[in-house]
Image (tube, rainbow, N blue to C red):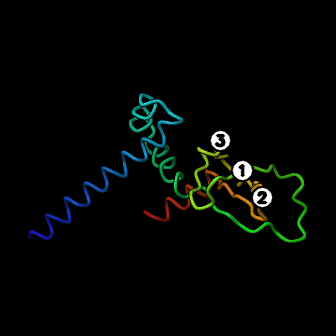
Amino acid sequence: MKHFLFLAVSLFISSYSFSQKVDETLSKKYSSEELKTLKKVDSKKYELINFSLQNACYIIDTPAGKNTSDYKAISVPDLTKLNYQELGLSIIENQNQYFLIQGTNKMLVVKSAIVLNQELSSKK
């Protein structure tokens, strides 16, 4: 019983801590009032935004032989910490986005809202 109580308290604290970190990250783009309203009025969108903070971006090698001259090049300071909001990007409803990463032979992919919704639904 002691172990169960300890586990429950630990999970609550880590959940609360993660929630604060997410709200802190989102507060760079949304006001606290907007976040409160979003949580109440459109909780699915709020959940998607939270999910997207960790899951919207990934890196691929630039495909050999593919014409990439139409892709925008962006600077990504830390390839291990990808956050589309901090890079000044946004999620598009029905289209993945591809960006060349300056100084590398890599590309950043930002998933569409449709892809993220499917991933989120499959995790539940």
Q: Which mark is residue 117?
A: none
Q: Secondary structure at mark 1?
A: loop
Q: CA distance from mark 2 to mark 3?
A: 19 Å
Give the amino acid type for the residue marked by disc 3 in the picture: Gly
Point out residue 19 in the picture as x, y percentages from the top left corner.
37, 48
Which residue is tagged 1?
Answer: 75
Q: Is residue 87 left or right of residue 101?
A: left
Give the amino acid type for the residue marked by disc 1 in the picture: Ser
Which residue is tagged 2?
Answer: 103
Give the amino acid type for the residue marked by disc 2 in the picture: Gly
Relative to residue 123, is residue 32 depicted above or below? above
Asked whether disc 2 touches disc 1, contact meaning CB atoms under 8 Å apart, the reply is yes
Please give the name of the residue rendered at 49% of the width and 60% of the height, measured from the top-left corner.
121
Crowd around label 1: few <14 · some 14–19 · many ≥20 (10 Å): few
Which residue is tagged 3?
Answer: 88
Quadrant of the rendering where the N terminus is positioned: bottom left
Quarter holding residue 111: bottom right
